[in-house]
Image (tube, rainbow, N blue to C red):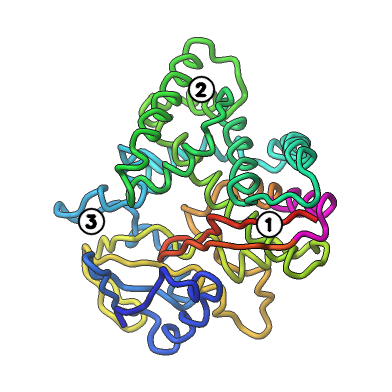
Amino acid sequence: MSDIDFDSIEFATDPDSILSGLRKENGLYPYQFPDGPKVWLVTRRKEVEEVLTSANVFQVSPATKEQSYKNNPFSEAIPKPMHLLATDGFQHKKLREPLEKFFTIEILENYRQYITDEVKKLLSGWKKGESIDLAKNFSYPIPVKVIAKMLGLKWNEHFPQYAISLQMVKTYPEDHLKNVVTFHQIIKETIEHKRIYNQGTDIISVLLNAGLTDEEVLSVSLLLFIAGSGTTASLIIQGLREIINSGNAPDHQLTDKILFRTPPANSAFPRYVHAEYELSGTKLYQGDLLIVILASANYDFKDSDDPLKSYFSFSKGIHHCIGWYIAKMEAEIAFEEFYRFFPKSKILSEEWFSNVLSRDIVSMKVELG
């Protein structure tokens, strides 16, 4: 079934209409990417969890000499494999441990008022009757501002565009590489400054205090900036679409509904097989490549399970999303405040983006009301 169209509007808006068929056929499905490698799509909950939690066998690091970090979806944006989504074992632990001390609920709650103030500031500048692209003017700027503050970056009005370029550079290098190079330099200069005058409590300062090298801090900072902007923006804009289409105030489950039904991350980062292993009745060999479809595992639940409490959208195992709490906080604040300001808005047009890795609404023009 190599004709699966992960780029289609059907997959973007209703992924299980396609994924349910894959789960029925096999928990491990052979798939040939157009002009790309052959992979195994992991579609059922049991096998998805097994791959994500068996870190000795299934790793994000290449398993053979022929394989390379160049195949990592972020290789153009993050030049060296020194970040959480390119490392396993000791190196991953070295990078993650200082971050876990920062990404506690207690510390992250300190950002709640800042997020609320930024959302209100943006919304208060608009008027009912205006036409606004909520994707470009709201769902992206807010999480970019938050992750920039968390990293300890001095705000730059071009940051939202840099965030988009970091995600799109692998697909359209001629359009985005210049922005990526510029942003790399901004991060490098920030690291150099903080290494000399390191008095902050921001993420870059925490990483430097933990003894990480400049290259490690750069790679981790770039990843957090990408992940902290793109996936959160997708979550926010999808929730706003739900609020506008329903005409109802957001309930306390809206964020989880979006994460379950149409998660910003369709799949976990590709896993290489590092030792012979049998999964779902299929023999796997060193070097085989697996794509773990999180969006499929979400729908593969028992009748006794609550799908809003057992989804895989933040992944599992050692690569579980470290920023899950702040992402949900940003979305919930954005939903509440937008409805309070503009409860009777109308969607004029929308443009979706989707592939095997992610989904987003890249444009959603709205008449505010």
* 170 relative to 107 in the view: left or right: left
Q: Which of marks 1 and 3 is in front?
A: 1
- Hey, what amino acid is under mark 1? Val
Q: How far apart are marks 2 and 1 (CA)?
A: 45 Å
- Hey, what amino acid is under mark 3? Ala
- The residue positioned 65% from the left and 51% from the top of the image is 134
Residue labelled with disc 1: 366
* 252 relative to 224 in the view: left or right: right
Q: Which of marks 2 and 1 is in front?
A: 1
Query: Regarding mark 1 in the picture, which secondary structure is present there?
Result: strand
Residue labelled with disc 3: 63
Q: Which of marks 1 and 3 is nearer the N terminus?
A: 3
**The stretch drawn in magenta includes residue 339:** yes
Q: How far apart are marks 3 and 2 (CA)?
A: 32 Å
The answer to whether mark 2 and mark 1 are in CB contact below 8 A is no
Task: Give, as a single range, the part of the protein colored magenta.
Answer: 331-345
The percent position of residue 68, horizontal first and vertical second, equals 22, 50
Above-or-below relation of 165 to 30: above
**The stretch drawn in magenta includes residue 167:** no
Query: Regarding mark 3 in the picture, which secondary structure is present there?
Result: loop
- The residue positioned 52% from the left and 63% from the top of the image is 352
